[in-house]
Image (cartoon, grey):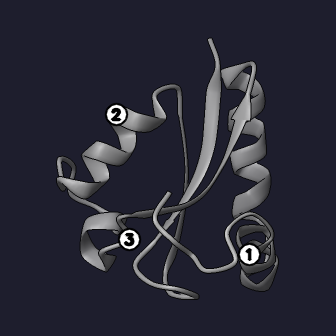
Amino acid sequence: MTGFVYMTSDKPRGVIYTGVTSDLHGRIWEHRNEIQKGFTQRYKAKNLVWFEYHPNIVLAIQREKSLKRYLREWKIKLIEELNPTWIDL
């Protein structure tokens, strides 16, 4: 099963949420429609600003755990390398 690691935000350089899923389209739909209560609902982090594809969900989970240990500035740099204007992907 393939996997995606992704980051959502409320605005450029705003709150950053890091997650992992096997269904990126469906998961982002859940964030935007506030299907589950939690961090993204509370902080309005609904814009997909970065994602990374992995051929294996286990690798995606490992990458997510690694990214969660990153400093905020490192995450911002990673996002801005792919998406300098923080547009909703």
For the residue labelled by badge 3, is the local secondary structure a helix, a strand or a loop?
loop
Mark toward the viewer: 1 or 2: 1
* Rendering coords of residue 55 (x, y %): 75, 20
Hey, which quadrant is residue 32 in on the image? bottom left
Check disc 1 and give the amino acid type: Glu
Q: Nearer the viewer, residue 77 or 71?
A: 77
Residue 26 shows which numbered tag?
A: 2
Name the one closer to the observer, 76 or 36: 76
The label shown at residue 45 is 3
Which one is earlier in the sequence, the residue at label 1 or at label 2? 2
Q: Residues within 10 Å of mark 3 (few under 14, many from 20)?
A: many
On screen, residue 2 above or below 79? above
Left or right: 23, with 56 as reference point: left
Residue occupied by mark 1: 80
- Do callouts 1 and 3 mark residues in contact (Cβ within 8 Å)? no
Residue type at the position of mark 2? Gly
User: Is the residue under label 3 in contact with that under label 2 (CB below 8 Å)?
Assistant: no
Element type at mark 2? helix
Q: Amino acid at mark 3?
A: Ala
